Amino acid sequence: MFSAAPVRAAEANLAVAVWFEGLSLPVPNRLNVIVCHGFGCLHRTQVALNEVDRVTLANMVRGATPEAERRGVARAVAWFDKRVGRQTGTSRAKAYARGLSGDSTQFDCVDRTTNTTSLLVVLEQGGLLHHHRVDQPTSRSIVPMLTGPHSTAVLTEKAKGAKWAIDPWPHNSGELPDVMPLERWVAKS
């Protein structure tokens, strides 16, 4: 299922590592992920991933085509929300959460982007992404600009180089994220 050798931060995509470094977080690994919540990663909960989690993820993400792999990634993001919600208290986090800064039960887009990117890194480290690689998160302006820029996790399709936004922020915890070409996501600003 997952490759046995851990991936060191130096081996991870540098731009992705810089995202985590900017939040004073380590690059996640296949055994542990720090889940951000409460807006701007104010609250941090370490979640251990066990063998059952890794098998579940492997079964979800498996896809013969890039499209099937993206559908699997979307399922994995929704599952991960439910899985970590028990430990973080975020099981009922609301879509588009604004004005709740500091509420440990909610996510802003920075939390969502960080958590989704963490999961994608775990999938990549585990050898589960065959058609994509994890890319640096991207931001866009929100009109009207109420809270600053909006961010998303990004996958790049290996064969075509197409970038895909994986954005759970517009959805309640445990729902499928938006998965769309990054250009279309950026144009929604």
Image (cartoon, rainbow, N blue to C red):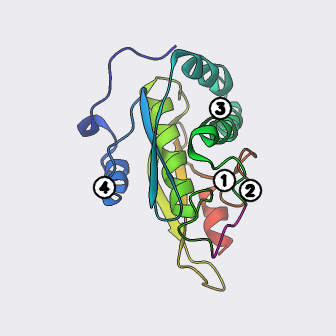
Residue under numbered circle 1: 168
Q: Residue at x 32, y 17 (%)?
A: 5
Give the spatial CA distance, label 1 vs label 4. 22 Å
Give the spatial CA distance, label 2 vs label 1. 6 Å
Residue under numbered circle 2: 171
Q: The residue tagged with tag 1: helix, strand or loop?
A: loop
Residue 166: x, y in percent?
Answer: 62, 50
Q: Is residue 166 left or right of residue 134?
A: right
Q: Which mark is residue 69?
A: 3
Name the N-terminal-most of marks 2 and 4.
Answer: 4
Query: In terms of image quadrants, where is residue 187?
Result: bottom right
Mark nearest the camera among 1 and 4 is 4
Give the spatial CA distance, label 3 vs label 4. 30 Å
Q: Which residues are magenta?
A: 95-99
Name the N-terminal-most of marks 3 and 1.
Answer: 3
Q: Is the C-beta separation of discs 1 and 4 under 8 Å?
A: no
Q: Which mark is residue 24?
A: 4
Mark nearest the camera among 2 and 3 is 2
